[in-house]
Structure formats: structure tokens, C-alpha cells
Image (cartoon, rainbow, N blue to C red):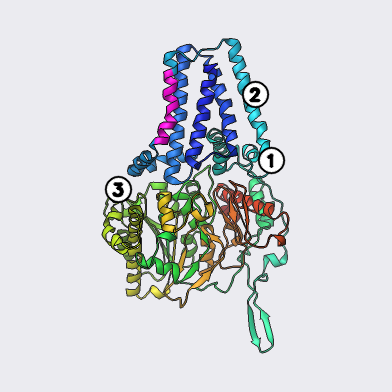
Amino acid sequence: MAGFLTYPLIIIYLEVVFHVAVYGSANGFIIYPVLFGMAVGVFIFAVLNFMPAIAGKITGSIIVAFFSVYYVVQLVYFKIFGTFLSLVSVSGAENAMNFKGVLFEKLGENAGWIVGLLIPLVLLIFLNIKGFIKRMEFKGRMIGLGASIISFFVAVLSLNIYGRNMYSPYSLFHDKYVLELSMNKLGVIITTARDGMSLMGKSDNKQSFEMKEETESEQGIAVYAGAAILNLADDTEAVVLYEPWIDETIDFNRLYNETDDSELRNITAYMTGCEPSYKNEYTGMFKDYNLVFVTAESLSKYGISDKCTPTLYKLMNEGFVFENFYNPIWYHSTIDGEYVNCLSQYPCSSQWSFYKSGETYQPYALGNALNKEGYDSYAYHDFVFYYYDRSKTHPNMGYDFKAVDYGLDIPCYVMYSDIDMVEASYEEFIHKDKFHVYYMTFSGHLPYNYNDNSMCLKNREEAEKLTENMGLSEEAVAYIAGQMELDKALGILIEKLEEEGKLEHTLFVVTPDHYPYGLSRETYNELAGKEIDNDIFELNRSCLGIWSASMKAAVKIDKACASVDILPTILNLMDVEFDSRLLAGRDILSDSEPLVIFADHSFMNDKIKYNTKTGDVIYLSDAKYLNENYLEDIIEQVESRLYISDMMVDKDYFAFVYQR
């Protein structure tokens, strides 16, 4: 009997310890990792008993060793990146070895949990040596197999306990695969199995849409719902009609009928029912301006101040001020954050979406879109070019791309400097008639200490002096010191543009790739001045700066918005033609309904916040005016946008639309 229970108890133990290590406690959903762990453990023991005694013991130890190490890897990955390791990420996991110091730091910080996860392996070896695990006869083996099957079906039937609504354990097991939620509600083993199915294309969360006939108003000019009023005379008013951002050369009905590909037809059907965003009072405000777009590594609004980072403070507070902006961390950290910023599509957990986009036609990527307008477009990154394969993705977006070991010659201090990147690059574009430059920065990268981060060390003395009366911890000051390098780099670029007489005619856009997950939660709370804990909304609250020296006053925007909305907002401000229906985001400055979506499919708009992990709904407006099916309707919108984004890249839909 001891042998029969050994493997189930080991798997259950690993699941429970992992869950508590990640989430801080165990809730009612822990029943599913326990039940499925029981089924898997009994199955392993039964199968091992069909093997010769010594081979069974060795194989059992290898299996438990694999499980233990896998749980440790998942835990450490989560502690570093704030998300879980999907199977597709394993192929790029070697990138993390560029930051061995961070890895060893996290191993040290979580040594207790790691030892706890390795205890079952040591215990199993001891039990095998002492002979406590007895083999079963043939009848016992068959009973064991039967017991594993029964345990599995009991676990499956128990999924009904929490109902069958969207994001319930039942739905996550049978239908809707969501990596973050599956880990939380079903455990590591089932999530890994679902992840494998998704990777093989057997769990695509497929949806179907019906064609909607386009009306004349949808094909041409439509009335702007929040129309401005112009006073034409003392007693006369006229409603301003704003055109929708659509490409009138696109005929979705024709495209639908000319293909036999069911998935292309499905995407096209969705597009016919998709509401576009409309031009507005800010359309063309920066037409023909030069554009500097910066994706800032791990930048946080809580690390910006007029004292320590005056340039970033100016960019965030003297232009368009987005007071309700969110920068969700997605499945694959920086690469997903940059993907959303640049292409206004949501990434997929079962593939590297940015990698995939490098093989597709992307006409609305800023480089491609502005090159058609006579711009020269450049992109730079102050780290090695092969990291996330940017030498493939960025040229595909229309950029002349340079990075370390790929045309960008800057000094190496183990960490690279944003200042060095700007100083090595600005001469290449600053004299052009119209230019667009994109920077993916690096100086704000983890770790935030003075032993492993030369950028933090470089600015240490200045940062400590500027923050001496703030009572901040060493890690918090080191983080600010790292971001000061970016601040100084942007200050240099602004100074050079002013000397060239081009500052007044240049638009700056600065936003992070994700929140600084390299900070301990205590330090993040410290910088924020409040307890963020595991609140997904507050954790991902962030900053977006859109600024030009030509602006006479700041424009405050209260609307909820996110990184997916950046691209259509820029295209509108620069009056660059695009079809808003083909992007997942919407122009923030338009009257489009806000919708902010997070990796675990939680969401918020101007009426509600919905947390998929807890099922909590927070009403931001008077609930009595909402339709009784309102929550379900928004959930459907969320799932549709995520699914279509995946398909847009997977099927190279832009190439289909524009016959490339």
C-alpha cells in the first residue's frame, strides 16, 4: 500500500507546494491539481510495476527527478519573468542565460521552495534503497491501472463543481485554454498537457463568425458618435462629421467569396462586423512630423520624477497625458510587449508571435507605413541582434535595423548604455527631410543592483544624491539609476534635434514593454506608494508619453487604454491611411469604446473590471443601466479579439487582403 501511494503523494505534494509558492496560499481550486495528481501518480506506479524491479526503480527515480526539476524551472521562471514557461518558450529559454546573475539571485531567494520541491526525489531514492516500495503482482497492476483511470474520471467529473461558465475549471479543461488561468485553477500537469496540445494545433480556442453585409454608411462616411459642435452663427449649430478609419479599397464580401480557406473566410466574416474607429479633432495633428518611438525596457510610471528623470517626466506630463494606461505583461515577456506596441495585435501563448510576424506582410507597422509617405525609417537596439531574432522582425516592419554585433558599434560594460546607442545613431537620421526612428532600449533591464548592473552603478552616486530624502531601499534607487541612463539618452537626442532645428517638428512616443518584474514586489510597492500585491490591474498600470515641443499645453486623457492602442493612435495623429478594423487596438483619442485585456483574459473598460482568476466583477458605473448579459457580451468581445489577433498573423491576413 505504501508503494501504491508513494507516487500519487509525490505529485500532489509538488502541485501544492508550487501553488503556494506562486500564489501565496491555496484556494478551493487546489482540489484539481490534487485529483489529477492522484490519477497521474497512480498511473505512473502501475506502469512501473510492469517493468523489471531494478529498471522500475531507476525509471521511477528519473520520472520524479524530471517532475521535480520541471516544477523548479517553472517556479524560478515565474519569479524572474512574472509569467509561466510555455513549451514554445523553451526554444528561446537559452536567452535567459545571458543574465546568469539574475538566475542565481532568484535561485538564492527561493532556495527554501526549491529544496521543498526536491525533497520527494531524495525521499523516493531512500525508500527504494530501503525496499519500502513493494512491487505488485499482475492483478495489483491491473487494479492500479483501473484506479488511475477511475481517479482521472473522478477528477474530470469534479470539474462541474464550479459550473461550466467561461474561465471555469471545466471550460479551461475542455474548451478554453488560457495559460495563466490553467496554472491557477488546474495545476502544472494539466496545463502542460493543454499547452502541448495547443502547440500541436489541437487546442486553438477556435471561434466562428458570420458574414455581415456592409451597408453604404459602413463603406463610406459615418457620423462620429461624439461629434463636435461648431457654432456657425449666433443661433446655428452644425455637427461635424468624421470619417471612419477604413480602407475603401477593401471589399470583404469579395475576399470572402474568392477563397476556399475556411479560416480566411472566418477572419473576413469577423471584419465585416467590426466597428472601426473614427477620425477626430486630433487627426493629422502631427502630419509629416518626424517620429521617435521608444519601447523602454521595464520602465514604470513609479520610477519617473521631475527630479531624477526630468526628460521622461516632461514626455509623460507635458504632452498627451494618459492617466489610465495599462501595459499588460504577456506570455513571453519583452518580445510580446514589443510585438503589441509595434503591431497592435495580441500575442499567442503557443507561439512566438513576433517571430511569426517576420514572415508576414505588415503594411501598418510604422516603418512600412511611413516609408510610403517618404520617410526614412531606422531601428536600433543596444543589445545583441540575435536576441529574440530582431534582425528578422524589424527589417520586416520597414526599418534599417542595427544592434550590437549587427552594425551598432558601442562599448560593452556587460550591460549596454542607451546613451551610447543614441550617440552612435542620431547622425544617421537627423539630417533626413523626414525620418522615423525606433529604439528598443536596454539600460533599464534587470537586475537592479550595483554588482551586476553597470548602468545602475554608473548613475549610483547621482541617484543616491537625488533620492537621499525619499527613504527608498537600495533596490529602488538602483532601479531609478538604471532608468536615468534612458532619461539622459532622450535628453541628448532632444538637444541634438533642437540644434538641428527639428525639435518643433518631431513627435516623441515613449512606453514600456512591461512592468519591471525584476523588482521584488516589496520594492515595487515602495515605488508605487501603495500595496499592489497580485492585483493584475494595478500591477500593469503604466505610462505612455506622446509629446512634441510644438504642443502649447498638456492634454489629459482619462480613458482606459493599453499598449495595443498605441499604433492606431499614432497613425491617426500623423494622418497615415490605415483600416482600423484590421488592428486589435483602437485610437485612444477616438470615441471607440475602451477595452483593456490582460494575459489571463481579465479585462476592464469604462464600466466594469473583471478578474478571471477570482471571478470578481467591479462596476465602475451604475450597474442598473447595464444589460443583464453585459458581462457575457464583453467576454465574447475579449475572446474574439484575442482569437482574431492570433489568426491575423497565423494566416498572414494582411497579405491576403492586399494580395501580396
Asked if the magenta segment contains residue 118, the reply would be yes
Gap in angstroms between the C-alphas marked 2 and 3: 52 Å
Circle 2 Cα neighbour tier, 10 Å, few/some/many (<14 / 14–19 / ≥20): few
Please tell me the numbered disc located at residue 150: 2
Which quadrant does the N terminus fall into? top right
Label 3 vs 1, first from the N-terminus = 1
Amino acid marked by disc 2: Ile
Please tell me whether mark 2 sits on a helix, a strand or a loop.
helix
Please tell me whether mark 1 sits on a helix, a strand or a loop.
loop
| Residue identifier under label 1 | 163
Amino acid marked by disc 1: Gly
Secondary structure mainly formed by the magenta segment: helix
Mark count? 3
Label 2 vs 3, first from the N-terminus = 2
Residue 428, relative to residue 600: is it above or below? below
Gap in angstroms between the C-alphas marked 3 and 1: 49 Å
Circle 3 Cα neighbour tier, 10 Å, few/some/many (<14 / 14–19 / ≥20): some
Segment tinted magenta in the rendering = 112-126
Q: Quadrant of residue 249?
A: bottom right
